[in-house]
Amino acid sequence: MATTGSRPRAGWLATVAFRWLAGLVLLVVVASGAIAVALQVTPMQTVTVAGQVIQVGATGPNLSLSGPGEIDLFGQSLPTNIRFTGPVRPRLQLSQITINSELTTFVEGTRPAGAERILGARLADGWKRYFAWETAVTGAGTLILVGALAGWRRVPNRTTVKLLAAGLLIAEALNVGAIMTTTYTAPAKLRQVHSLNELVGSQTRPPRIDPAGRPLRRVQAVVIGDSTAAGAGLAPAPGSSGNARACGRSADSYAADLSYVNGWKVLNLACNGATISHGLLGPQDHNGARLPPQLAEAERASRASVIIVSVGADDLNWAAEVRYCSVTPNCNDRATAAYFQQQLASFSKDYLDLLSRLAALPAHPQIIINRYYNPFGAQPGCLSRDGLTPANLQTLTSRLATLNTVLAMGAAQFGFSSPQPDFAGHELCTSQPYVQGLGAAAPFHPTAAGQLAIALADQAALGQPVPQYRPTPRQPAA
């Protein structure tokens, strides 16, 4: 009889244990959902350092237990140079740049003064405030979810109170347990940050190089950049130097157009193959010659009121992207997409260096960052014979648009202009293309008419009258 009577009791205990376990699992699921929602909706905390504004928040839960944080830079989510412990890590957003005397210190940390250590302290304080808010939001979210669940199940009030207390306890225990390691270790690591470059900048950025040579006091405008700005594939300027010819600088470049239209002496320093680190900020080895950094040369023109920049394509190895898309049925595969994102992240860091150095120029010239034109158009047309299918052209166009977005967002953050020339109706396969064909000396580069279109976009950005026609003859840029 005892054995028989114990079976119902054992079954009752099993049922109760199962209900408690199911309730506990349900509360854990609800708490986990509240934490996930809190990480998404908790407002990022704003910190201000030297007039520059950064917002501090957190990444979503990661599968790994340690790794880098994130920083949103020019629309790109980049990993920080600092690694953090825990599945949830700091996320930073550079939301406002102010051009002032402390900007260089903020970006590069070049002064050994104690002021630069303020950045790390402010980031640490912002992270602590964010975690306090996130904890409160998690608790509130848990109470709302558990209360709604109890109301739906018509649970008695006393049981509802118990469920709310249990849910809140479980949620905060999970929240603190998951984030505690990061919460207590992140501030110490953030306090070590003395500059934005130290947090996310290029590890191999070129050193600042002072200008060498006589001042160029008669120059009113300077053009720096890559083969697009040089005028690759077009007629060389008469009497140009060896370096100018080697770099592909042309009498038909937009620098020459601007020189003629405005009556300016324009110094064109652009060179084929130039990148930010090897060309603009650092020296460039080109055709057996070692060329000085373009920006250092530009600083010799201390009275120039305008500096125009065309850069990015060579940083992203764009020519190789186009070649690959012409020989493969689908160039939007995972490996190629990952390579593009890696190159774009590296470019974004170098771009930050370039923008900060342009902003720190003593004369404070007007800065124009040219976006790239679209050479392809909507239909492949003649390009289909060379393997560029509509799908691959769409991939290239999308990636070019992404690069232009980074260029525009970076320029806007620093208060610079970022015009984009309009090649609509004059793409490669049209009757009057602004782009050199595949059999030309510099395929996909602007023709003389394309260079003029770029000059017109820059002229509008300068606030200068836009000419209706191109008179001839004209003088080349310097």
Image (tube, grey):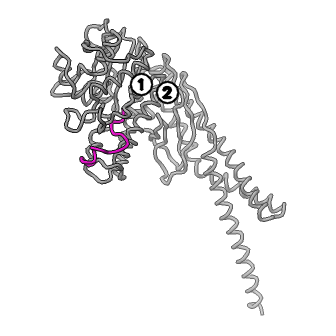
Q: Is residue 428 above or below residue 167?
A: above
Question: According to the image, label 1 marks what residue?
Answer: 355
Which percent across, then down, holds residue 86?
Answer: 52, 49
Quadrant for residue 424, please give it: top left
Residue extent of the magenta highlight: 371-387
Residue 421 left/right relative to 268: right
Which percent across, then down, holds residue 338?
Answer: 37, 48
Q: Amino acid at mark 1?
A: Leu
Query: CB of mark 2 within 8 Å of CB of mark 1?
Result: yes
Q: Quadrant of the N terminus?
A: bottom right
Tag 2 secondary structure: helix
Q: Nearer the viewer, residue 55 or 411?
A: 411
Tag 1 secondary structure: helix
Which percent across, then down, holds residue 71?
Answer: 49, 38
Instruction: Determine which of the numbered discs, if any, sits on residue 413 in the image.
Output: 2
Q: Is residue 74 magenta?
A: no
- Identify the residue at horizontal 48%, vertical 53% (top origin): 64
Q: For the residue carrying disc 1, how many other residues have a C-alpha within 10 Å: few (<14), some (14-19), or many (20+)?
A: some
Q: Nearer the viewer, residue 52 or 271?
A: 271
Whether residue 434 can be seen here: yes
Q: Is residue 186 above or below residue 8?
A: above
- Identify the residue at horizontal 26%, vertical 49% (top origin): 387
